[in-house]
Image: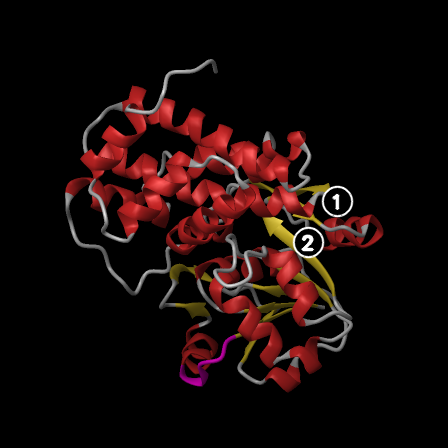
Amino acid sequence: MICVLGAGAFGTSLAISLSDRGNSVVLWARDESHVAEMTQARLNARRLPDAPFPSSLQVTSDFGALPPDGPILLAVPMQKLRGFASEHAEALAGRTLVATCKGIDLQTHLGPVETLSEAIPSATPALLTGPSFAADIARGLPTALTLACADDTVGKSLQQSLTTRNLRLYRTTDFIGAELGGALKNVIAIAAGATMGREMGDSARAALMTRGFAEMQRLALTKGARPETLTGLSGFGDLALTCTSPLSRNYRLGLSLGRGESFDDAITVEGVATARAVTDWAAELGVDMPICSAVNALCQGRINVDDALHALLSRPLKEE
């Protein structure tokens, strides 16, 4: 049996996809009233109103009712992951835990896998990441993702159990590269959105994506990631998706910044916290990250889009 903790759009979409091939899947949500709504309507009207639940999908708010074995997917935002894992450390001890968030912890500068390792040392952590939108997964549209787990034996088992008719998983042991690819592309997506919101054109966006990808590689390789991980689904693939689609929350925030419009504070945009974390972290490591630094300053309101562009274009000329 598979369990998904977190009934946001992405967690719900994964639960639907995993249930579709006959798996018994439990979807957990903290809010009892939300669980009651989903149980009665057999869909998540708050997050995915057009995606009905398969009959094999169960919904609960009772943590004690979780299955005693099988993988557990944690569909929890990055900045809440450590607190969630610590709160439920006893119940999750010794389990195989698959994080589905993308980002870097503001306090520790750790990614999802290392965060779970610290919070629950007895657990086996993994990461599911890559170019994907919840609505596509819930509709059964083909999606390819990266499954990163340092223990390749566990990774192979997860690859088999989490692959569905529309989810194709590619396995890697390079969780550092997978973590950083998924985290950093959100920052670059904000910059890409701001570029388009300011009507700078597709050519400018292409240049920004290319130089942003160079930044992603620079930091990831410094931390020991493998180059091929960054050129795969969890790096380049995710970057291409989030920098070009308005379905991306990070891209939409960038569009709003570029247009000088307000943005709904209730929407979780992981790239904002990641920009802040990576700017501090890169400075400590001595890694040059000008686009990430500009996005951080832009999100904090210290500069505007024109200031950010001027700062980037005023940098010394160099070889590619």
The residue carrying pointer 2 sits among few (fewer than 14), some (14 to 19) or many (20 or more) residues within 10 Å by Cα, namely some
Q: Position of residue 243 (x, y in %)?
A: 38, 35
Q: Nearer the viewer, mark 2 or mark 1?
A: 1
| Quarter of image, res 98 | bottom right
Instruction: Give 210 or 284, whichever is nearer the viewer.
Output: 284
Task: Name the kind of residue labelled 2 in the image.
Answer: Leu
Q: Which mark is residue 173?
A: 1
Quarter that holds the N terminus: bottom right
Considering every residue shown, the one lying at the far right of the view is 153
Q: Secondary structure at mark 2?
A: helix
Judge from the rendering whether residue 223 lies leftward or rightward of residue 317; answer left or right.
right
Q: Position of residue 39 (x, y in %)?
A: 48, 78
Considering every residue shown, the one lying at the far top of the view is 319
Q: Main secondary structure of the magenta part?
A: loop
User: Is the Cβ of the residue at disc 2 closer than 8 Å to that at disc 1?
Assistant: no
Instruction: Give 268 or 286, whichever is nearer the viewer.
Output: 286
Q: Secondary structure at mark 1?
A: loop
In the rendered structure, which segment of residues is drawn in magenta? 29-33
Is there any visible trace of residue 48 in the rendered image?
yes
The residue carrying pointer 1 sits among few (fewer than 14), some (14 to 19) or many (20 or more) residues within 10 Å by Cα, namely some
Which residue is located at x 37 percent, y 16 percent?
317
Disc 2 or 1, which lies upstream in sequence?
Answer: 2
Q: How is the image coloured?
A: secondary structure
Q: Magenta span has 31? A: yes
Q: Quote the CA–CA distance across marks 2 and 1.
A: 16 Å
Q: Position of residue 46 (x, y in %)?
A: 36, 68
Which residue is located at x 50 percent, y 76 percent?
29
Q: Which mark is residue 162?
A: 2
